[in-house]
Amino acid sequence: MAELGFKPVLLWSDALVFMLVIVLTIFFYRLRNDPQTRERWSQVFSSRLGMVAFTVIMTYVGVALLDSMHFRKALPSPAGVDTDEVFYDNKVTSVLDVMLDGMGDRFERTYSAPFALKSFEKSNIKDDQGNMVRDFDWLMHAGQHLADPSDKWLDVAQLSAIALAWGLAASALVVGLQWLLLRGSVYPWYASWAVQAGIICFMVWLVYVSHYYHVLGTDQGGADVAFQSIKGIRTGVLLGTLSTLVMLPIAVTLGVSAGYFKGWVDDVVQYLYTTLSSIPGILLIAASVLLFQVYIDLNPDYFSIGMEKADARFIALCFILGLTSWSSLCRLIRAETLKISQLGYVQAAHAFGVSHSRILGRHILPNVVHIILITFVLDFSALVLAEAVLSYIGVGIDPSMGSWGNMINGARSELSREPAVWWTLTGAFFFMFLLVLAANLFSDLVRDAFDPRVSGGRHS
Amino acid sequence: MLAYIIRRLLYAIPILIGVNLLTFTLFFVVNSPDDMAASQLGAKYVTPEAIENWKRKNGYDKPLFVNDDASGIASLTDTIFYTKSLKLFAFDFGRSESGRDITSDVSTRMWPSLAVALPSFAIGIWVNICVALMVVMFRGTALDRWAVFVFVSLMSISYLFYIIGGQYLVAKQWMLVPISGFDPDFKPWKFLLLPVLVSVISGVGSGARWYRTLFLEEAGQDYVRTARAKGASEISILFKHILPNAMIPILTGIVVLIPSLFMGSLLIESFFGIPGLGSYMLDAIRSQDFAIVRTMVFIGSILYIIGLILTDISYTWADPRVRLN
């Protein structure tokens, strides 16, 4: 591996998320020939809104996956030491960091406004004569190429024009390829292409202009806010999907067996979910996270690098969220199974002596898949929002791991400064809002297409 | 009716025992009192004597379930399970890790909490129903579609932004109310105005959208067509026919909201500096005071169960056909 110049690092959350992608691909691949499912999905995608929301969600997922490919760079071998051993940087980098082209490495000393050239706060600096004065210091990574600071906005306009040209060229390439493949399609792909072009132009512009300015300013620690907002994507997307992945097997197994076997199984399952749902979720989550935190504090030897510790806490949070939130889905599946197991074809299967496992697998499970799907999409946005709240309470993501919740938490009193520091909150708000809005709109469409009750109500 | 309530209360007992066992397992079996003491006293650099001292001071030095040293009934009562967990049923909450009396804390902090939560809850439901009825009047038009889009957008904004934005605009920019604080004697409404406003506005998105679906479902029923055929006006159809018939699902939906009240009060009270149960919980979580967290879990589940029973009773009031038996 030495000649590669890097060493891949597989965090637990990376492994889980790639596993999830494989499972989902197999799931949808197997469903592709089912005519009913096809018809429902085509209802979702024949609306422009569905296409737009799906494109936005996929962009976020793509960014999250790029940010989940981690590696450690090789350090140049120290001079004078003759050894074949290669040393690796302690800092874990992701493919996304490389694609953003060093956006996260340009630190300032503290706050600076978007496109500012000078620091937001005064500090002690030396003037031309060597005297100490208190003034706004020049930023280290903004407008270094400018000969005259008053040209700033002209320069920004020029840079934007160049970036836009590159962005349009790149989107023409991407959209053109898809057009060649999909031009005969009945679905409104043009809506998706418009969004793709917009996103590509924005990203190219952001990366290009970030070389010369801090587009969204810097936060208290001097880190680039735009970079942090993008890094929050992985945390949000992974938390939303992995927690549901933990919840699904519990909810489905318990719900189906309660509805199918009835009797004491039903009593036990009902008792379990009533008990669990009567505890305020936020307290249960907080208590569990606190207990896990105690465990981490007392066993520091299990985690060799800081990133692994943050990752362990992240996965624990996913598990805790999953283990505490299965009751509502379980209730829905139980009710549906009760209904289905009364139907004629299940009774007939019983009469023919078909085994329980076969009835469950062939007749019951396929008919509750739509509930699972609707819950998966619905819960996703709720979990992304919950992350911010949990981080505020102090039981969320590890502060060393970037997330929108941690950004909001760190910036919650910045608006009351004079003048107000608005850009950190704006960055987190914008990126979070877009994802949650797209997920909510998409889940509405999925529910309309898959829930027979709702679509029945629509026609009336 | 009375028999029904008594039976429901009896049903609640196994659930509360379950809650109790679950919290006990979480707090004492998964994490032993030794772990708790170590993390309270500062993780790594702590002597075994200090841990023993801390446990003795806070009453954690007993065995979990059965005390072999004591005789008779004391072998069951002189245990952590009895003193820390079972006593909650008698509303004896004991002392917090920092030595304060939890029962008196809870009873004084209850009132500011209620002063915020009840108006937000009631006004919130009223506003949501009004907005939803207005949107239903325009059903099938472009206005309706745009309204749904606005609701979904409002739903997609984190609760934290509503609070931060509200404080910034109303309190800092327009200077209409104080940013935070609470004073029960001197014009308390002044301090309550903004928290209530924020929680009402933050709930409009999901609330109005949910009520709209309910009303639309009712609007498709036959009795609505009959009423219209008889010449009833749209307004009277909405208020006299659709609203009363949608009452049962509305009440069911309100119970679902009760747990979210908890989270709402947690955030609202901490941002606005209101000395209620929400900020009490938050402080306990932040300082890892497990005795308070245990108590609040117990109180929370009792409130939830009471809410469930109240809903069932309110069904009979909303719909005379419902009989409780």
Image: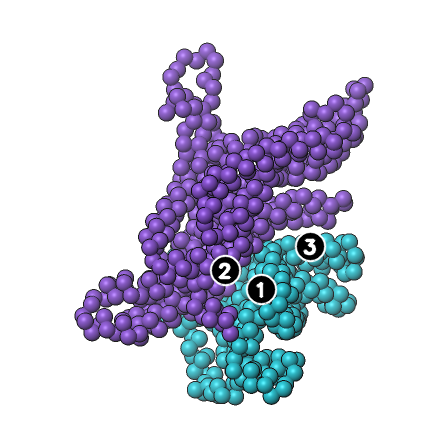
Chain colours: A purple, B cyan
Relative vertical location of residue B46 with respect to residue B88 in this rendering, above or below? above
In the rendered structure, are the residues bearing label 3 and label 2 in contact, judged by CB atoms less than 8 Å apart? no
The residue drawn where x is 72% and y is 30% is: A155
Residue B317: x %, y % from top left: 55, 85
- Residue B205 seen in the current view: no
Q: Is residue B131 left or right of residue A343?
A: right
**Residue on which the image places disc 3:** B165
Query: Viewer-nearest of labels 2 and 1?
Result: 2
Residue B86: percent from the left, percent from the top?
A: 44, 68
Residue at the spot of label 1: B206
For marks 3 and 2, give the CA distance.
Answer: 30 Å
Work out whether A102 lies above or below A436.
above
**Mark 2 — on which chain does it sit?**
A
Q: Would residue A333 be found to the left or right of residue A50 on screen? A: left
Amino acid tagged 3: Gly
Q: Quadrant of residue B163?
A: bottom right
Q: Say what amino acid the circle numbered 1 marks.
A: Ser
Q: Residue at x 29, y 65 (%)?
A: A363
Q: Which residue is mark 2?
A: A445
* Label 2, residues with CA under 10 Å away: few <14, some 14-19, many ≥20: many
Q: Is residue B5 visible?
A: yes
The residue positioned farthest toward the left in the image shown = A353
